[in-house]
Amino acid sequence: MTLEASILELQHAVGAVTAATERLRLGACEDSPGGGRTMFVDEVCNWALEVCSAAQAMKDELASAGASPDRASAETVVTKVAGHAVQVEDLILQRAVDPEHAVSMARHSVRPRGWAGWVDVTTGAIRGCAAPLAELRMALLRCWSELVQRPDIRVDRATVSHLNLAGVTAMGAKQET
């Protein structure tokens, strides 16, 4: 895989995460029933907005690199995207594994007038972020795999019995060419 191909894969993965976090925001903020909105619902909505904002920052960072960034620019962008990805994942995990969040969601699911639907949509959207985040982690790994390859090292010939890298043998002695 080339660096350009891995950047394209990263763009696709970032788009999938952004779409998943947008579904989370819509579910948490706009699908809540109007009557009896609680502080918990506002807290979940604010959290979803923060997740969306981090995902959008990741997308904007990647877009700023252009279609085919040079190696140095790509390294900078991939580093920044990885930082935003960690932030998105941490925010998602805050809610996904928090027992207090689970208890509050259970309390809201038994409320009358549509709250069970809001709970289902919101918890489904949280779970729906898992696959795109896994895809993003793999895309970042592929980008880093491409970036760590050294283009200035030329492999003349490589076999099990002989390895010659640009005039230096496997034993480290300089070889006459």
Image: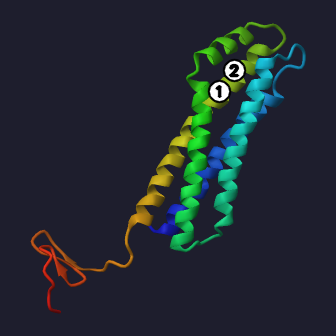
Q: Secondary structure at mark 1?
A: helix
Residue 70 lies left or right of residue 29; in this view the side is: left
Type of the residue with mark 2:
Asp
Cβ–Cβ under 8 Å for marks 2 and 1: yes
Mark linked to residue 120: 2
Q: Is residue 153 above or below residue 2?
A: below
User: Counting other residues with Cα less than 10 Å from the Cα at mark 1, is it few (<14), some (14-19), or many (20 or more)?
Assistant: some
x and y, in percent, of residue 30 in the image: 83, 30
Residue under the point 53% across and 71% down: 72
Q: Nearer the viewer, residue 170 or 136?
A: 170
Residue 130 lies left or right of residue 64; in this view the side is: left
What's the distance in space between the residues labelled 2 and 1, CA to CA?
6 Å
Q: Give the colour scheme shown.
A: rainbow
Residue 77 lies left or right of residue 170; in this view the side is: right
Residue under the point 13% across and 80% down: 173
Quadrant (top left/top right/bottom left/bottom right) for the N terminus: bottom left
Q: Secondary structure at mark 2?
A: helix
In which image quadrant can residue 59 be found?
bottom right
In which image quadrant can residue 17 be found?
top right
Q: Is residue 62 above or below residue 114?
A: below
Residue under the point 78% across and 21% down: 41
Q: Residue beneath label 1, please?
A: 124
